[in-house]
């Protein structure tokens, strides 16, 4: 008998046999499927309860995908690589759905390992997809799809790794390293979404000029970037760099707006209050560059630092814990940027000057420059790569 | 001075001075504590109310070796009994702190057991006290409490098996006297109560006074609360007087004893303050994080600590048991947060 029998794998969607026949990227059938998925989720009473599912549903609607498709067109002919094996984060409920959509959009069949931790969101999405795939209209996509659930097991990871044409690996550095040890086919492509670091730049002058409505909107955006995921998302900022004049007054205005949003929306639980306070104690002991500390009723901790060490990416807040640095010029911070840096969120600074900052200084990090409020917006261009292009091959005709 | 004899007004005044002195001492002698207070903007030379004085989160004792005396003065290092895989707290005691802990423990306990030493049965194994260099909270507890009794007998053998014959002999020998029993709540339940219940044997501890502590985490997983514990234990050994205590390895000695009415009591050596998530002070009967205050720690900055437990003040100075001081309940550990995000948290289990 085959060893296969012994693996403890639950197939939430699909079966063991997964077709490897690729499609072209942005195949019409796939785009239609994603749009149907979007409507199904948005009309599903169970799904509506979860803002993260709704964000995904909004993301995979027709108009958004059409925009990506338009950006994608470059006159070349492509096909998907075949079969993509997705190892998605075990502690985030909805990432697996984006990962699946990336695989489909690039024309591939997909085996998606969903979080082993039980999340209602995972169940709801899987149920909706399963029901949709029972429709004959999607028999092709059905033959290309499996959602699997199993406890961490390198033998199972190894079996799927040996048979796929690409892997999408979400995880911390240790996790990625352990998956990378598992053998793959010689042409197999790995895309690793590893642990990253993100920060934010605010121009004080622009902030001081902002009206109340604009300020409220900015605070809302900042809240979504940070508190929504307790600053655990790779794209959530930990460090706020201030540019310009009259920074102290600007900070006052900014943080009091953040405080009114956060105190209204955020549920600060004991364990997080203790974690923040403990982190502050540790920082007090470890860091020699702290110039100030401000505590807004435990909702916001602000640690001012007067020097940016090369290992600034080790300064990581949680649940509303921020490091602040006043820069006289953006070029002051170039030395801290390394390949760990992912997202730069900004307010009041021209994006061309930020782009110029990255290119002119030939920086090895910063893959995304987005306005405050859009840190968590997932895109087919992620971590510096066009995922659809990376997961498809060009058929070069001369 | 009796251990439960300070009224609120007396204690407030006394504690503001005593804790201010301790805070200044640790500020001057513990470099890490000094840094924390500086960042918090706390000036120890100015007079503060007790609830405005900074606290150290207990987790910090796991991550740092915090001392307020020279290392050469340390005579004993205690370690919390961290469950497997977790880091442990390390608490450094000099001669005077260790001696004060022992004295205060005796003083508090004898308020419940009388000043006369009693024959003592420890519901644990003797091997728990063998490792002398690094005292586990368990070993330290056993040693500390065993000073309160004589003819100290251990109820469990090295394999944590109930030594029924030894216990039986002990009980018969002292059947006309008060007996002091000590153990950790979980050990008593797992290796004493369950074993007796299973064997279907009875022993007679009608004259026993059991003092136990160490936390309810494992028992609450088995849905065993304090009342159930007392009731079922009585079924197997007829014991009537069972007192739980609440304490931390960071504040050994100045423990909080459960009174006859089932409330934990602060003594003249200790105090509690419950805090909301913004660290403001809770009202009476409002559950919050338990902050613990002790006058004993001199060799490490543990005089004001923030625990990870949730508790509630029931009253002050007016418990029907007659003891003065705050009396309270501890509801257990704070709830762990659901992790949100995609960073390094799942490194070990993809």
Image (cartoon, coloured by chain):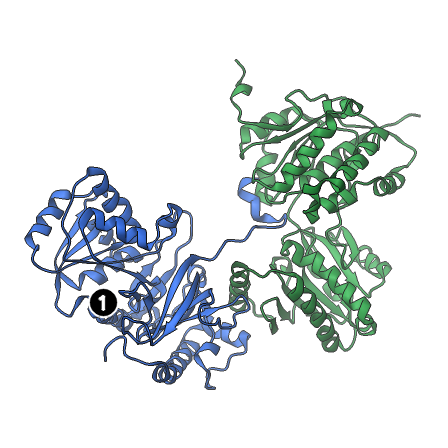
Q: Residue at x 73, y 22 (%)?
A: A143
Which image quadrant is residue B295 in? bottom left
The answer to which image quadrant residue A289 occupies is bottom right
In the picture, the quarter occupied by the C terminus of chain B is: top right
On the image, numbered disc 1 is attached to which residue?
B109
Q: Colour of chain B?
A: blue
Left or right of A363, for residue B138: left
The answer for which chain carries disc 1 is B
Q: Can residue B256 be seen from the camera position used here?
A: yes
Could you say which is closer to the camera, residue A219 or residue B34? A219
Which residue corresponds to the image point at 78% horizontal and 72% vertical from the top-left? A204
Element type where label 1 sits in the image: helix
- Horizontal side of residue A311 vs A26, given as left or right: left
Q: Which chain is green?
A: A
From this view, report whether residue A173 is shown above or below residue B261: above
Determine whether, in the image, residue B78 is placed left or right of residue A269: left
Is A119 located above or below residue B145 in the figure? above
Residue B110, image x, y percentages: 20, 69
Q: Position of residue A297 (x, y in %)?
A: 59, 71
Tell me where residue A7 appears, x and y as whole percent: 53, 24
Residue A331 seen from this side: no
Q: How many marks?
A: 1
- Relative depth, front residue between A369 and A12: A12
Q: Residues within 10 Å of mark 1 (few under 14, many from 20)?
A: many
């Amino acid at each position: 008998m085959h060893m296969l029998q012994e693996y403890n794998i639950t197939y939430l969607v699909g079966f063991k046999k997964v077709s490897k026949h690729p499609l072209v990227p942005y195949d019409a059938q796939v785009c239609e499927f994603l749009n149907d998925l979007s409507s199904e989720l948005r009309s599903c009473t169970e799904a509506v309860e979860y803002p993260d599912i709704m964000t995904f549903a909004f993301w995979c609607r027709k108009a958004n995908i059409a925009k990506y498709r338009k950006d994608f067109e470059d006159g070349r002919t492509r096909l998907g690589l075949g079969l993509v094996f997705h190892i998605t984060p075990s502690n985030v409920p909805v990432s697996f759905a984006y990962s699946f959509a990336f695989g489909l959009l690039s024309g591939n069949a997909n085996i998606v390992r969903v979080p082993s931790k039980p999340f209602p969101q995972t169940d709801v999405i899987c149920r909706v997809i399963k029901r949709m795939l029972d429709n004959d209209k999607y028999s092709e996509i059905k033959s290309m799809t499996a959602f699997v659930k199993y406890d961490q097991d390198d033998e199972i990871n190894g079996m799927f790794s040996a048979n796929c044409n690409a892997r999408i690996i979400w995880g911390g550095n240790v996790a990625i390293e352990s998956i990378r040890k598992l053998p793959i086919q010689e042409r197999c492509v790995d895309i690793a979404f590893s642990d990253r670091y993100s920060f934010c730049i605010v121009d004080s002058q622009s902030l001081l000029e902002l009206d109340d409505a604009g300020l409220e909107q900015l605070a809302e955006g900042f809240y979504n970037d940070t508190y929504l995921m307790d600053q655990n998302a790779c794209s959530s900022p930990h460090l706020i760099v201030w540019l310009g004049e009259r920074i102290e007054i600007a900070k006052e205005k900014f943080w009091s707006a953040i405080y009114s949003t956060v105190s209204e929306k955020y549920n600060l639980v004991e364990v997080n209050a203790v974690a923040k306070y403990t982190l502050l104690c540790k920082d007090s002991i470890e860091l020699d560059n702290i110039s100030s500390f401000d505590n807004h009723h435990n909702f916001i901790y602000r640690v001012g630092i007067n020097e940016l060490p090369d290992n600034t990416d080790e300064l990581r807040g949680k649940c509303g814990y921020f490091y602040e640095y006043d820069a006289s010029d953006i070029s002051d911070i170039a030395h801290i940027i390394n390949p760990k840096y992912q997202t730069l969120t900004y307010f009041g600074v021209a994006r061309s000057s930020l782009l110029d900052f990255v290119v002119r200084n030939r920086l090895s990090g910063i893959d995304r420059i987005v306005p405050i409020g859009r840190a968590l917006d997932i895109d087919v261009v992620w971590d510096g790569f066009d995922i659809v292009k990376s997961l498809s091959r060009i058929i070069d005709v001369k | 001075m009796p251990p439960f004899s300070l009224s609120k007004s007396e204690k407030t005044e006394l504690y503001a001075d005593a804790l201010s002195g301790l805070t200044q001492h640790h500020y001057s002698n513990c470099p890490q504590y000094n840094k924390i207070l500086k960042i918090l903007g706390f000036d120890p030379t100015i007079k503060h109310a007790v609830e405005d004085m900074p606290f150290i989160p207990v987790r910090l004792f796991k991550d740092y070796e915090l001392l307020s005396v020279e290392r050469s003065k340390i005579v004993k290092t205690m370690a919390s009994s961290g469950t497997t895989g977790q880091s442990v707290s390390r608490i450094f005691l000099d001669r005077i702190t260790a001696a004060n802990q022992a004295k205060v423990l005796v003083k508090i306990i004898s308020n419940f057991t009388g000043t006369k030493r009693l024959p003592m049965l420890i519901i644990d194994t003797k091997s728990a006290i063998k490792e002398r260099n690094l005292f586990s909270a368990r070993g330290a507890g056993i040693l500390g409490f065993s000073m309160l009794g004589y003819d100290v007998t251990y109820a469990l053998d090295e394999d944590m098996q109930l030594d029924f014959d030894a216990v039986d002999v002990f009980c018969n020998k002292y059947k006309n006297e008060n007996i002091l029993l000590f153990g950790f709540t979980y050990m008593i339940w797992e290796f004493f109560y369950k074993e007796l219940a299973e064997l279907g044997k009875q022993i007679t501890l009608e004259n026993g006074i059991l003092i136990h502590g160490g936390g309810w985490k494992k028992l609450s997983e088995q849905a065993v609360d304090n009342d159930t514990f007392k009731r079922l234990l009585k079924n197997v050994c007829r014991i009537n007087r069972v007192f739980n205590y609440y304490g931390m390895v960071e504040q050994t000695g100045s423990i909080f004893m459960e009174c006859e009415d089932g409330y934990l009591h602060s003594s003249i050596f200790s105090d509690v303050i419950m805090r909301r998530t913004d660290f403001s002070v809770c009202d009476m009967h409002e559950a919050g994080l338990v902050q613990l205050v002790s006058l004993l720690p001199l060799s490490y900055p543990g005089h004001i600590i923030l625990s990870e437990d949730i508790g509630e003040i029931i009253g002050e100075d007016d418990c029907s048991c007659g003891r003065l001081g705050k009396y309270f309940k501890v509801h257990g550990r704070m709830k762990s947060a659901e992790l949100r995000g995609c960073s390094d948290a799942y490194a070990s289990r993809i």
